[in-house]
Image (cartoon, grey):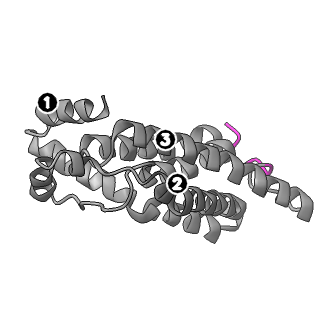
Amino acid sequence: MDLEILKGIHATFHSQTWLNFIMVGITWLGEFGAAAILLAVILFIFKKTRWSGVAVAVALIIDFLIVNVILKYSVNRPRPWIEWNEIIDFYKSVGARQPYDSSFPSGHAASCFAAAVVCLFRFKWKGISVLVVALLVAVSRIYLCLHYPSDVLGGVLIGSACGVIGHFAVKAIERKVGRKSDIDNGENRT
């Protein structure tokens, strides 16, 4: 079923060169967790959002351990291009990096959703922009046929769980050290 969805996307959309290149640009935001790591660094730099940066970093570390250290090696699902060689020409034509690691779960989706969920908890509606980016990255992985849809769904769920854990772990630490967190000092009030 997963492969049929990808073949349908390829047949329907991949003739749209402009959309292909937009999706490649979007997918690069999730490369190696770059956008999520950059977000953690930016949040950490400013005193007002420092604890949020720590929470994103904790979520990303947990995500990395679960996705890249445990699941990718234990599941070891082949990428779509292994089963469907014809898609390799598409990757080359749009300049998409052809990944060789396990397809399940999507690390791009997981890292972006880990960061997005932390931002939703800590900044409420202001965190929606991070969620939109995470959704676009997840869709781009399916659109470009770099992951099966179930890989991306797995990444979304795992990343979201890591975001929840990261948020609450750091919130507990904040309370233990007796510091006011950026979520408690009015930063996210609407």
How far separated are the C-alphas under marks 3 and 2?
10 Å
**Residue 94 quadrant:** bottom left
Q: Outermost residue, bottom direction?
A: 45
Nearest to the eye among marks 3 and 1: give it: 3
Does the CB distance between marks 3 and 2 fall below 8 Å? no
Reading the image, the residue beneath label 1 is 12
Q: Quadrant of the N terminus?
A: top left
Residue tagged 3:
154
**Against 182, is 8 above or below?**
above
* Magenta stretch encompasses residue 188: yes
Residue at left 9%, top 56%? Answer: 93
**Helix, strand or loop at mark 3:** helix
Q: In screen coordinates, is 144 left or right of 12?
A: right
Q: Position of residue 86 (x, y in %)?
A: 10, 47
> SS for tag 2?
helix
In the structure shown, which secondary structural element does the residue marked by tag 1 occupy? helix
Residue type at numbered disc 1: Thr
